[in-house]
Amino acid sequence: MNSNISTGSVIKLNEASLSHLGDNIRVPNYDRHQITNGIVHIGVGGFHRAHQALYLDNYFHQNPGSQWGICGVGLLEFDKRMRDALESQDCLYTLVEKSPAGDRARVIGAITKYLFAPDNRQAVIDTLADPKCRIVTLTITEGGYYYIEGSGEFDANHPTIQYDLQHPNEPIGVYGFLTAALNRRRQQGIAPFTVLSCDNLQGNGNIARKMLTAFAQMQNPELGHWVAEQVAFPNCMVDRITPATTPADIKMVAEQFNIDDAFPVVAEPFLQWVVEDNFSAGRPDWESVGVQMTSDVHPYEMMKIRLLNASHLLIGYLGSLAGYTYVYEVMADPLIRQADARGLANATLSGIKNAKLRFVYSIFNS
């Protein structure tokens, strides 16, 4: 197909259409049918598809026939739209990286299967309990962990938690599904999977460990002890700006790249993933595609909070006051760039609250 977007011919995205897309669009060059799903991801949204799935897509280009494919899982009624989009497109989707240098599109093939739990809860449990599943990754948002703000304790009285405790074979929440599968693996002598939270929470692995272990102990003390002793919960730090997909994004993908994609995802060019190297049953060679494996994620988290997040706040506040709409407009302003640079220098000297105060101080004293 001619890659000239002025032809106006829009092609529905699926496996059969990959060879007909424009030559300006990168597509999977590996056989997706030779990939085993060693990873189950719960909470397939924009961020997962622009971040973890991209890293795995890069990995499969280097390692065809891998055992680390992704089976996506949606637990909520809200996930119907993702189910419908991915099932109609053989689990393919378009990732567009937007930058001042120009937009770039590629088709991601790392997700090879999608399960919508309300359709078949047992299929989700069976997939998690299968020995081929060696890592379970999560992007379930802060609210999905069921911890109490302030105390950090497990919210055992939440209706979802109470339902899953009373219906262990028909769960609706993430802990219900994980414990149902882990209990079966324990009974059958199968090693547990690793639980890897990819949500933007400081100490996300520690939170996942505390909450899941508390739930398992309430359900079955022996299971709770086994989870505490055998399951790995590495912390990780994630970073990539990924706005929610809008109708305008869908239209843009059709007009610029001639792809009819029901649920594309748009992101900035920058991405980062730092992971503690602590896994129960192996992992991909993520280092080969740029993931930073470490023994301690905490220093990276502090660097992000003090430098990246604080500077984002600064340019957001100043940009709004100056009448700008987008970050790239703000960063084109030399005065704001100067204030940001001064703020970054000050931020290395203290915690985030002081960093914000130092930013403001530097602005009014420049």
Image (cartoon, helix red, strand yellow):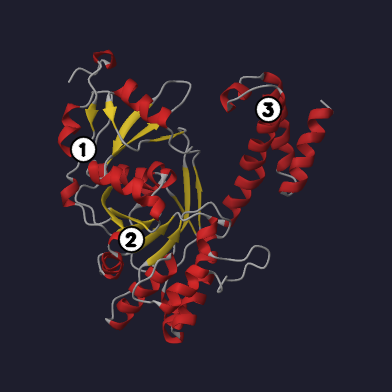
Label 1 sits on residue: 14
Question: Whole-percent x and y of residue 187?
Answer: 30, 83
Q: Residue furthest right?
A: 365
Cα distance, mark 1 to mark 3? Answer: 41 Å
Say which label, 1 or 3, has the lower sequence index: 1
Mark 1 or mark 2: which comes first in sequence? Answer: 1
Between marks 2 and 3 in the image, the one whose residue lies nearer the viewer: 2
Local SS, label 3 = helix
Amino acid carrying label 2: it is Pro
Q: Mark 1 falls on what kind of element? A: loop
Name the mark on residue 118.
Answer: 2
Amino acid at dot 3: Ser
Question: Tag 1: residue type?
Answer: Asn
> In which quadrant will I find the N terminus?
top left
User: Residue 97: in sight, yes or no?
Assistant: no
Nearest to N terminus: mark 2 or mark 3: 2
